[in-house]
Image: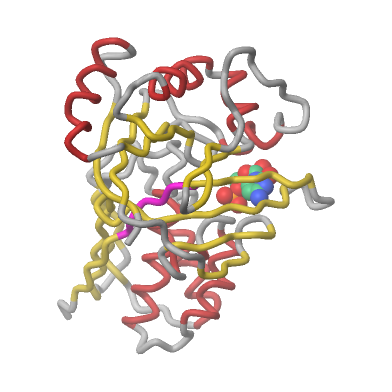
């Protein structure tokens, strides 16, 4: 038994994220536009085995039941009654606690992979229902690359993709705890001198209602946004999801290397940076 299936699990950006209200169940009603970052992916391999194993090249990823890959596998098995043992290996490239959906994408790829190994027994619609029971962001990764997500993020409809746009991602060493960002959304205040208003483009807008609670706690991220918006190469700048990744839409992709160097020199020498494309 050595059949192996390898899948890439891409990151996402939220180009707009509006928080509409807090719901009775504690979650927040959202209206968000998400796009994939096809060039920034984790990679998962699934091999039919005699016993379950899980390994990951990043020691920061837990190997227990709190891991979204293993949660997805358990949820799939419960739904499909398919208990084939698997050796799963995860290669992480997408940082966690970053607002890039790395763990959610890994979970979605796991659901897609195990259903494929099980002869497509459940199909995408059922997988999206299972995905929503594990995390709000996960169904998106089983659907179209550009999507509007509503509800708590699990209701997905295809959206127009923006044109191909060069983007730069910057992330400091710390991550942001998503529950904390939502918890403080209703009581948080705007910091003076920081632009939060939608930035308008021919293809849509950049806006994120979670910047308010997150910037209040992590002033550095507000400084990164201001710094990016002050650069002539930058057309727009925003936090993705609940952070801590800040991204910029660039006027042209040749600007990225110099911008990364300048950001490390002027903001923080340890910034994680990635450049690539969104849209189609
Ligand atoms: O669904 P997920 O597990 O990714 O959500 C993590 C936490 O973020 C939730 O427990 C909740 O505190 C918060 N959240 C929210 N409203 C959403 C999505 C997440 O309040 N729409």
Please give the name of the residue rendered at 43% of the width and 55% of the height, measured from the top-left corner. 35
On screen, 44 above or below 277? below
Image: 115 above or below 265: below
Q: Which x, y percent locates residue 178?
A: 58, 38
Residue 109: image x %, image y %? 37, 65
Q: Is residue 182 left or right of residue 168?
A: right
In this rendered view, identify the residue nearer to me: 11 or 115: 11
Name the residue located 41 percent from the left edge and 51 percent from the top edge: 12
For the rendered model, the colour scheme is: secondary structure
Q: Is residue 19 left or right of residue 15?
A: right
Residue 168 is situated, as x and y percent measured from the top left of the image, at: 30, 36
Magenta span: chief secondary structure:
strand
In this view, the residue farthest toward the right is 24
Give how far across and how far down residue 192 sits, in percent: 64, 12
Name the side, left or right, on which 230 lies relative to 28: left
Q: Where, by quadrant of the figure, is residue 231 drawn?
A: top left
Q: Total number of numbered labels?
A: 0
What segment is highlighted magenta in the picture? Answer: 9-14
Residue at left 17%, top 80%?
1
Q: Is residue 64 above or below residue 227?
A: below
In the rendered image, residue 157 lying in the magenta stretch gets the answer: no
Q: Residue at x 43, y 37 (%)?
A: 98
* 45 vs 245, nearest the viewer: 245
Q: Which residue is most to the front? A: 202
């Amino acid at each position: 038994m050595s059949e192996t299936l390898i899948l890439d699990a891409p990151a996402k950006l939220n180009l707009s994220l509006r928080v509409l209200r807090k719901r009775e169940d504690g979650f927040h009603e959202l209206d968000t536009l998400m796009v994939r970052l096809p060039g920034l992916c984790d990679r998962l391999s699934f091999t039919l085995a005699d016993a379950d194993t899980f390994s990951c090249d990043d020691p920061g990823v837990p190997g227990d039941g709190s891991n979204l890959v293993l949660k997805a596998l358990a949820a799939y098995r419960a739904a499909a009654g398919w208990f084939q043992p698997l050796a799963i290996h995860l290669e992480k490239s997408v940082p966690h606690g970053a607002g890039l959906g790395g763990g959610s994408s890994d979970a979605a790829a796991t659901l897609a992979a195990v259903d494929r190994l099980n002869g497509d027994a459940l199909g995408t619609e059922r997988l999206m229902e299972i995905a929503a029971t594990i995390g709000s962001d996960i169904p998106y990764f089983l659907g179209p690359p550009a999507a509007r997500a509503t509800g708590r993020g699990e209701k997905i409809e295809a959206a127009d993709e923006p044109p191909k746009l060069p983007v730069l991602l910057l992330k400091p060493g710390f991550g942001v705890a998503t529950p904390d960002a939502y918890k403080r959304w209703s009581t948080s205040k705007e910091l003076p001198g920081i632009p939060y208003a939608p930035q308008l483009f021919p293809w849509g807008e950049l806006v994120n209602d979670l910047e308010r609670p997150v910037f209040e706690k992590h002033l550095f991220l507000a400084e990164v946004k201001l710094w990016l918006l002050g650069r002539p190469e930058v057309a727009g700048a925003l936090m993705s999801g609940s952070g801590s990744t800040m991204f910029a839409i660039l006027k042209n992709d040749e600007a990225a290397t110099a911008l990364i160097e300048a950001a490390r020199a002027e903001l923080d020498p340890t910034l994680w940076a990635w450049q690539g494309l969104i849209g189609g």
